[in-house]
Image (cartoon, helix red, strand yellow):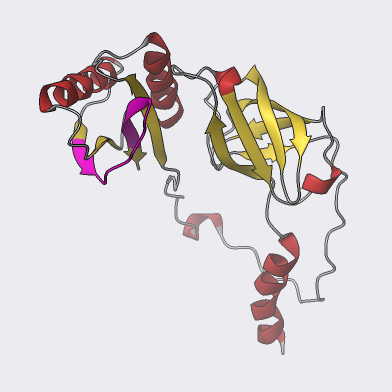
Amino acid sequence: MRRLALFLLPLLFLGCSGSPLRVASVERSGPPPYEPGDRTYKVVGDGWEELRVGSSLDLHRPGTRKPSGRLVVYATGTGYVLARLATEGETYPLVGDLASSRDIRPRPLPEWPATAALPLPRLDHMEPATPHSSLALFESIFFVKGDGTLSPGGTRKVGAWVQAYGREGLWFLQVPKDPRVEEPLVQARCKALKDCLLQLGVRRVEIRTGAFEDHERYDLIHVGWQP
């Protein structure tokens, strides 16, 4: 019976904990280069219904204590709120960042089944924790049609991503297949992005080819990172 209770305990916790308040998507508006104020952040998760227009949301990256900035809600929907960046943090706000707000009342903890106390493990028998990260980056840098140069806004974006994710890990550029863009122009854009990453201390950058993406006004190249 005791073993059954211990087995059901994690399942009970998962059933009651729900989904944390987090950034689900980011939409851009206006022409590139996109500045922080041009982005709309869609926030979902437990407590969204208590947020109102003007509510503040503090962001932080899972696995780190660095704040990602502060959002302010400007619209509400069914199951989500829309917010804009009000204060920049130490890192750049990204999809998956967790959000917290003083406008959300604390929720009562579930009642746990009574179980016998388990002995604490001996410190000399514990394995050291292995640092890891499940975060991944896949964002876009936009280019004006026919232009192969990296804009100042694009340079700032790349710098913010490297600051948030670090120089280690796998950095790559993914170029969508587009027969309308000449190869010398593609090479110039890849070189501009690769040089920017290398100057920021990234040791190696892979270049990949992706599926066709139709954008009428601008061309793009995706910048990615994996741990």
> What is the magenta range?
207-224
Which residue is found at the position 82% from the left and 31% from the top? 53
Identify the main secondary structure in magenta. Answer: strand
Which residue is found at the position 87% from the left and 57% from the top? 108
Q: Is residue 213 magenta?
A: yes
- Looking at the picture, how far across and down is residue 27, in whole percent? 55, 33
* Left or right: residue 227 compared with residue 178: right
- Looking at the picture, how far across and down is residue 126, in whole percent? 49, 57
- Looking at the picture, how far across and down is residue 96, in whole percent? 55, 43
Indicate whether 131 appears above or below 172.
below
Quadrant containing the C terminus in the rendered view: top left
Indicate whether 46 appears above or below 181.
below
**Residue nearest the viewer, comparing 195 with 152:** 152
Indicate whether 67 appears above or below 170.
above
**Residue nearest the viewer, comparing 89 with 190:** 190
Count of residue discs: 0
Which residue is found at the position 67% from the left and 41% from the top? 43
Image quadrant in which you'd find residue 103: top right
Image quadrant in which you'd find residue 133: top left
In this view, which residue lies farthest toward the left?
184
Which residue is found at the position 67% from the left and 73% from the top? 11
In this view, which residue lies farthest toward the bottom?
1
**Residue nearest the viewer, comparing 192 with 170:** 192
- Looking at the picture, how far across and down is residue 181, in whole percent? 19, 29
Quadrant containing the N terminus in the rendered view: bottom right
* Left or right: residue 188 compared with residue 161: left
Q: Is residue 7 magenta?
A: no
